[in-house]
Image: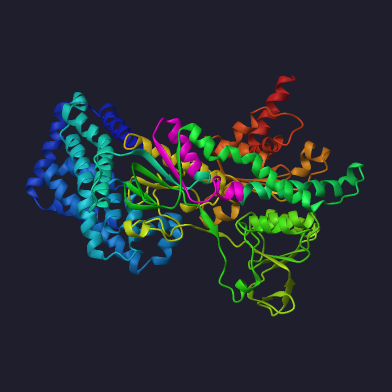
Amino acid sequence: MRKPLIFLGLIALAVIAAFLVADPDPERLRALRDSLAAWREAHPLALPIGFFVTYVVVTALSLPFAVWLTLLGAALLGFWQGLVLISFASSIGALLAFLVARYLMRDWVRGRLGPRLAKIEKGAARDGEFYLFSLRLIPVVPFFVINLAFGLTRMKGWKFYAVSQLGMLPGTAVYVAAGAQLGDLNSLSGIVSPGLLGAFAALAVFPWVARAALRFWARKRAYRGYERPAKFDRNLIVIGAGAAGLVASYVAAQAKAKVTLVQEGPMGGDCLNYGCVPSKALIASARAAGVARGSEALGVRADVSVDWPVVTRRISEVIAQIEPNDSVERYEGLGVEVIEGHARLEDPWTVRVGDERLTARGVVLATGAAPVIPPIEGIGSVEPLTSDTLWESLAAMPAPPERMVILGGGPIGCEIAQALARLGAGVTVVEAAERLLIREDTEASDAIAAALRADGVDLKLGAKAIRFGHDDSKWLELEDGSKLGFDTLLVAVGRKARLEGFGLEELGIPANKVIETNDYLETLMPNIYAAGDAAGPLQLTNAAGHQGWIAAANSLASPFWRFKAHAAPIPHAVFTSPELARVGMTAAEAEAEGVHHEVTTYPLGDLDRALAEGAGQGFVRIVTAKGSDKILGATVCGAHAAEVLAEFALAMRHGLGLGKILSTPHIYPSWSEAAKNAAGRWRQAHVNPRTLRIAERFMAWRRG
């Protein structure tokens, strides 16, 4: 909304400046306009044809002054003639740009548009002509980007032209009306004439009106064939009792809405029962063993022994301690109706649970995700464990597993491998990629790999598993022909969203790898939202919780207010030793997306608190916009990385640059100083040498 207002302000300033700089004599202005009118009468076709050809060329070449040309043409030609010429010229020029992109410049366009192209291709594949019409009606994306990007889609040229002609017409009419009013201006006092003020007001209001009309049309289109109930039993139905579903239910209850939570599995979902909580309890025991073994450098000698039954029993105890926070009793006490059973959508407002039919104005799908078992030959015969079944198996073992293979070198694989190795297990990690944690900073990934090796984990990197089997013992064959014997296999290659059996297919809600949503977490049915692992793109508890409150708030406040789901950067961490935490982009991602950036690295070996604790290994790495202190991303690798990263996540969420972090007093000595010192490194690299020389001379002058 700010861009149209700025644009209107610039137009007004330009008009006022023209009157102030030039002679504002009304007679002179009328004489100039009359002379142009006389020239047009003498050459009735030259001006319209010349303007039409010029506009087509400007649009086809994607030159950045089509808006100003629209205003000029309307001022010279008047409203109706200007509207006809500009409407057809802009559509023809757009079609030419579309064809050039499709047949002559595909590779250039793909490289130039980068991630914006992927988003447009996804929208075109999902909604086709309607998506193009919405982009034309509400110009949230520059028109030249639309012209080029749609040339790389499967849309036919004639459809692109027809939709563009229709979609751009309302906006063109508003701009032409403003230009025509500017053309009728006779004096400085005309700036405040009702016609010109009305034209400016139309420019400001049009995006809001168009957006509301588009939403109304989209809803009518989505609900075609369904009859909306006259009244509802509930305000909100939430399907799934993991992080996203619990937060959504809590938000609705706090808003005094009538909300029903349908849960098929245990309350708390994967995080409480199979993921975050049990893994961090295991890691706590492993970290204690690791610290004790490494304490000799601090002057303390310890004889470390592991009581395995106590370790596994403590995991269950920790789950039991946290369980009441996510229990049925707590949520019913908050005012949430909790129903156990399998939920299935019958229509956009009706959910069936067993024999019971529930209706609600809004529905939140928080169905979670399940571990993936890859289709590798023989894998079923060796009884693989997953993150869901690992804990029961470990509790049944009298001691840590002696020969364990972990398939997958992502966060789960790395955390479990190091923890079990520190507690006495024999662990081998098999990862098909050339390094662990392939999405993270390369130096951080290498540091984690070195730490795992130091703790006794055998890493097989760039190793593809092709076959499992068993004879006297279980074995895994790798692509290079080598075999690994093992007793226990943990598969940690990822998780897939739970999408089947909820009625999505019958309602036509797109769900491939995840349930497709827009920026507000709305599915194809605007009253049905998706959140958490089922919606993606991040499978993180904190991401799921954030999306859960967004989905609930949007459902309850619709159509009066909406929040965007992706406005807040989502931090994440890998809880190995050292920890790895990140928010936003890595340098490699910025490079791949063509973002102009700078990288600042601060070694934790320079942090006083780290040296005092004998934990100086690691670094803070910040990616900033080129020539600016705007934070695009931050990676912390080292002790307490998750806590150090929080300051960067807060700064990114609220648009604070490194200068704000640097100017904030921090406790000394503390780990949080790592963020401030890293900001200081950035500042040192951006001090202007000329400024320093001037300061030196000034100080010398002051000394006399």
Residue at 23 percent of width and 51 percent of height: 167
The image position of residue 235, as x and y in percent, is 36, 37
Instruction: Quarter of the image for the C terminus: give it.
Output: top right
Instruction: Quarter of the image for the N terminus: give it.
Output: top left
Outermost residue, left side: 41
Position of residue 230 relative to residue 479, above or below, is above
The image position of residue 430, as x and y in percent, is 68, 67
Image-quadrant location for residue 128 = bottom left
Of 625 and 368, which appears nearest the observer?
Answer: 368
Position of residue 549 relative to residue 19, above or below, is below
Of 300 and 252, which appears nearest the observer?
Answer: 252
Q: Can residue 564 be seen in this view?
A: no
The image position of residue 377, as x and y in percent, is 59, 76
Of 356 and 676, which appears nearest the observer?
Answer: 356
Q: How many marks?
A: 0
Position of residue 460 relative to residue 396, above or below, is below
Residue 576 drawn in magenta: no
Residue at 34 percent of width and 37 percent of height: 558
- Left or right of 94? Residue 452 is right
- Colouring scheme applied when the structure was drawn: rainbow
- Left or right of 391? Residue 53 is left
Highlighted magenta segment, given as a residue range: 245-273
Q: Can residue 28 be seen in this view?
A: yes
Residue 252 drawn in magenta: yes
Image-quadrant location for residue 624 = top right
Image-quadrant location for residue 564 = top left
The image position of residue 454, as x and y in percent, is 80, 58
